[in-house]
């Protein structure tokens, strides 16, 4: 900033108080617009982040140098009773405490307790019903814990009964000895059982088919709660709407089921040669080498064996590493087919589909393996390589639900619907199976991110077979920002159930599409988003970690964007106020005035169409709203304007389309003030000062001796009068423009000047 000299200040003091008038900065006289709700400080104010970076979470959005995360490894054995739907199991957990804190107790999730009649989740189900809970089924639901023991020793293990307390869907286990920090480990052995619900919160279930039951089993074993650097123990109860937050580890699982059942599960089948008929095992291996779908277990084989050996048993052995969960499905009714998945590193994985005869056919699950393969290959190439040896799609009675390496999709889905649900559920491998966000609190960090990547995958699939037209956000604007909506940052349990689809899925997904296509550009966005995934793979990011990572990698302050879309439920409304031809001559260009009427700020995109039919696309950055509600810019047209259209492609959720189009027929055209007559040098007999009036960019500039140049604007409804509120001065020219009175706004004093 240039500092004025003492001589200049003394000279200006001769102006009967002008210096004080300047300092007071009398506000300009403007016409108040009561419908304008925009506040640029609310949108762009600093200090979006409420805390600085920490040793565990860097300010740049990546895990800090002291980031830590606890670990849970599981050895599980379980037996399924195909008649009673009961599962009896033993869960051995090796829990490693990598935190800096000692522990005298640990917390576990008992998610099956949601299905107890007196659970909190059942209590919050409205009388009108819900997709959550047991959906009206009356049965003896919930976990039955037979024993809880802490195991110590090597070959000669010692098992000590541990004190525990069960509170709804949580179990607190008090350890016989304090668990050491920074690497201390404890082994916990839990014997449990439960009856599988028919419809378990749309996440698991039992489906009756022609050839027997399909069991889709999830949230089935006692699972460690997460202990992190943000909240310590995360013990929010499972109420049904909010999903899960889990530690990573290795799973070794042995499942004993009726002998006529076929079992698919998370990870790799270790004893396929033992449990599969020789011919089917041969086909299983062939499928892993084939780009085309291979039939492993046919409908004919299902029909011939579904009701055989029902009294015998088989044990299926599965293993998955570095995963946050394990799920499985079992049925005598499974048709099975598979194909090879090609990964960017050169590694291969196996795509599998398991479904009943009711779901067969090329318009249905006959293409499921093709869908699985395409989905996994796309996400692996675009974002991060698929980490598991198998990806299995199971037809069950869920609408769609995701787990590491396995998903459950609706058995009645066909065609585009089946592609959509398959692609969506496998997209969840990246969010939250790889990037392990806290779904219980921030549903948008998995559902929203996943819905976003689904839009790209669908556009790519089979040369756009199922591609959809872009959403008309003008038509959907009201649904995005209804006054009764909660914010995206609300937890699913803190939203009306009817709002979850919008707030967890569609609104955050739309936000990312806009951020990618209209704000950052595809390349910058993709680089930042890919980096976020790489940084937080198999870790636990918070919302700030995502925001910071995107900003730091893209090199952009996006606080205005996060505030609008995620933190607040702000509405968007841009409009065209008027146009003004430069010097009232269309050949010299046009000044276009746009206004941001509501709380949300976004860039400006508009099309200018001239009388000859030429259309020009104009894009203005969001920074024009950083200190303005209204913005005027010059467009270098050379003829009359026929129309101007804001957001012509409807890519923004504009709540008011009525002000988006200006036409020559009914739009406002302002008269330009031709400045030529006012230009020149003026002086006064009252002081040794001169005032120069010059024109630049169609604006009248004022330079007073030894004082900084400033701009004045024509005063509305006053002829030959210009004013600067910042300078505290008004200039009233005579009709001949041979002189003017300089009026000091603070005092009303008038000083006459004459043109030289």
Image (spheres, rainbow, N blue to C red):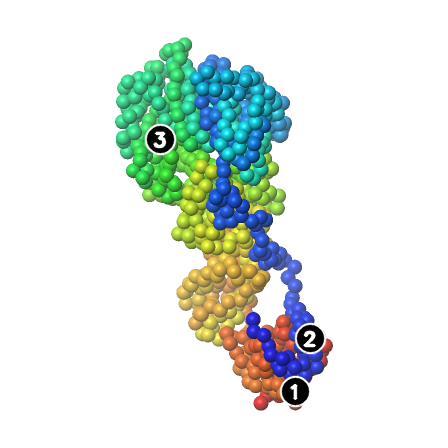
State how many labels appear. Answer: 3
Q: Earlier in the sequence, mark 2 or mark 3?
A: 2
List the residue tagged with mark 1. Answer: 687
Circle 2 Cα neighbour tier, 10 Å, few/some/many (<14 / 14–19 / ≥20):
some
CA neighbours of label 3 inside 10 A, class few (<14), some (14 to 19), many (20+): many
- Quarter of the image with the C terminus is bottom right
How far apart in space, not on screen, are marks 3 and 1 (Cα)? Answer: 88 Å
Percent coordinates x, y for residue 664 in the rendering: 50, 66
Residue matched to label 3: 389
**Residue picked out by circle 2:** 20
Q: Position of residue 263 (x, y in %)?
A: 39, 21
Q: Which badge, 3 or 1, is on the more N-terminal residue?
A: 3
Mark sitting earlier along the chain (2/1):
2
Would residue 744 be seen by someone viewing this image from the given angle? yes
* Residue 294 quadrant: top left
Mark 1 neighbour class, 10 Å CA radius: few under 14, some 14 to 19, many 20 or more = few
In the image, residue 206 above or below residue 2: above
What residue is shown at x 49% (from left), y 38% (from top)?
Answer: 68
Residue 439 visible to an observer of this rendering? no
Q: Residue at x 47, y 65 (%)?
A: 642
Q: Quadrant of residue 8?
A: bottom right
Residue 91 position in % (x across, y down) = 48, 21
Residue 674, x across and y down, in percent: 54, 78
Q: Secondary structure at mark 2?
A: helix
Q: Is residue 750 left or right of residue 210?
A: right
Whether 693 is drawn above or below 509: the answer is: below
Question: As rendered, which of 723 and 498 lies closer to the eye?
Answer: 723
Q: Which mark is residue 41?
A: none
State the residue at coordinates (44%, 69%).
Answer: 637
């Amino acid at each position: 900033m240039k500092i004025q000299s003492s001589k200049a200040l003394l000279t200006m003091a001769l102006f009967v108080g002008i210096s004080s008038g300047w300092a007071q900065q009398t506000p300009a006289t403007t016409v108040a617009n009561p419908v304008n709700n925009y506040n640029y400080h609310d949108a762009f104010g600093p200090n979006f982040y409420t805390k600085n970076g920490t040793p565990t979470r860097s300010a740049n959005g990546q895990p800090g140098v002291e980031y830590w995360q606890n670990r849970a490894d599981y050895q599980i054995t379980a037996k399924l009773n195909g008649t009673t739907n009961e599962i009896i199991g033993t869960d051995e957990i090796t829990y490693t405490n990598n935190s800096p804190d000692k522990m005298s107790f640990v917390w576990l999730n008992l998610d099956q307790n949601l299905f107890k009649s007196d659970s909190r989740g059942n209590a919050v189900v409205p009388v009108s019903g819900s997709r959550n809970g047991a959906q009206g089924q009356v049965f003896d639901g919930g976990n039955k814990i037979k024993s809880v023991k802490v195991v110590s020793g090597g070959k000669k293990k010692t098992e000590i009964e541990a004190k525990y307390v069960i509170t709804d869907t949580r179990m607190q286990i008090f350890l016989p000895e304090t668990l050491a920090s920074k690497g201390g480990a404890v082994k916990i052995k839990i014997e449990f059982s439960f009856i599988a619900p028919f419809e378990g919160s749309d996440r698991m279930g039992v489906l009756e088919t022609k050839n027997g039951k399909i069991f889709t089993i999830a949230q089935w074993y006692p699972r460690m709660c997460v202990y992190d650097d943000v909240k310590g123990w995360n013990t929010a109860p499972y109420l049904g709407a909010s999903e899960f937050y889990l530690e990573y580890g290795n799973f070794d699982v042995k499942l004993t089921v009726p002998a006529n059942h076929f079992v698919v599960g998370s990870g790799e089948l270790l004893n396929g040669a033992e449990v599969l008929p020789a011919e089917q095992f041969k086909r299983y291996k062939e499928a892993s080498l084939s780009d085309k779908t291979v039939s492993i277990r046919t409908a004919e084989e299902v029909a011939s064996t579904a009701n055989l050996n029902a009294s015998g048993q088989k044990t299926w052995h599965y293993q998955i590493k570095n995963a946050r969960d394990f799920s499985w499905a079992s049925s005598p009714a499974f048709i099975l087919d598979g194909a090879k998945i090609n990964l960017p590193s050169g590694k291969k994985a196996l795509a599998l589909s398991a479904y009943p005869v009711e779901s067969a056919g090329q318009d249905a699950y006959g293409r499921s393996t093709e869908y699985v393969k395409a989905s996994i290959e796309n996400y692996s190439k675009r974002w991060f390589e698929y980490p598991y040896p198998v990806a299995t799609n199971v037809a069950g009675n869920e609408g769609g639900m995701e787990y590491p390496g396995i998903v459950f999709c609706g058995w009645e889905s066909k065609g585009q619907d089946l592609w959509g649900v398959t692609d969506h559920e496998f997209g969840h491998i990246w969010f939250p199976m790889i990037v392990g966000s806290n779904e219980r609190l921030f549903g948008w960090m998995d559902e929203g991110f996943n819905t976003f990547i689904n839009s790209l995958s669908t556009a790519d699939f089979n040369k756009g077979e199922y591609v959809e037209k872009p959403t008309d956000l003008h038509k959907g604007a009201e649904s995005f920002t209804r006054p009764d909506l909660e914010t995206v940052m609300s937890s699913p349990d803190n939203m009306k159930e009817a709002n979850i689809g919008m707030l967890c899925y569609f609104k955050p997904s739309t936000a990312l599409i806009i951020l990618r296509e209209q704000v950052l550009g595809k390349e910058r966005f993709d680089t930042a988003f890919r980096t976020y995934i790489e940084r937080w793979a198999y870790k636990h990011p918070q919302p700030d970690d995502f925001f910071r990572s995107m900003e730091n990698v893209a090199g952009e302050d996006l606080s205005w964007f996060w505030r609008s879309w995620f933190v607040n439920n702000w509405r968007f409304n841009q409009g065209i106020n008027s146009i003004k031809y430069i010097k009232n001559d269309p050949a010299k260009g046009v000044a276009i005035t746009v206004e941001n009427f509501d709380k949300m700020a976004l860039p400006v995109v508009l099309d200018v169409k001239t009388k000859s039919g030429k259309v020009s696309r104009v894009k203005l950055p969001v920074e024009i709203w950083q200190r303005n509600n209204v913005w005027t810019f010059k467009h270098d047209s050379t003829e009359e304007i026929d129309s101007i259209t804001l957001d012509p492609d409807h890519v923004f959720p504009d709540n008011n389309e009525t002000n988006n189009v200006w036409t020559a027929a009914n739009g406002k055209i302002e008269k330009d003030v031709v400045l030529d007559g006012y230009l020149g040098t003026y002086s006064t007999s009252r002081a040794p000062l001169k005032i120069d009036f010059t024109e630049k960019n169609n604006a009248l500039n004022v330079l007073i001796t030894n004082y900084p140049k400033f701009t004045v604007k024509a005063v509305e409804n006053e002829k030959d009068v210009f004013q600067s509120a910042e300078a505290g001065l008004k200039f009233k020219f005579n009709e001949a423009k041979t002189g003017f009175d300089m009026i000091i706004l603070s005092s009303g004093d008038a000083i006459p000047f004459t043109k030289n």
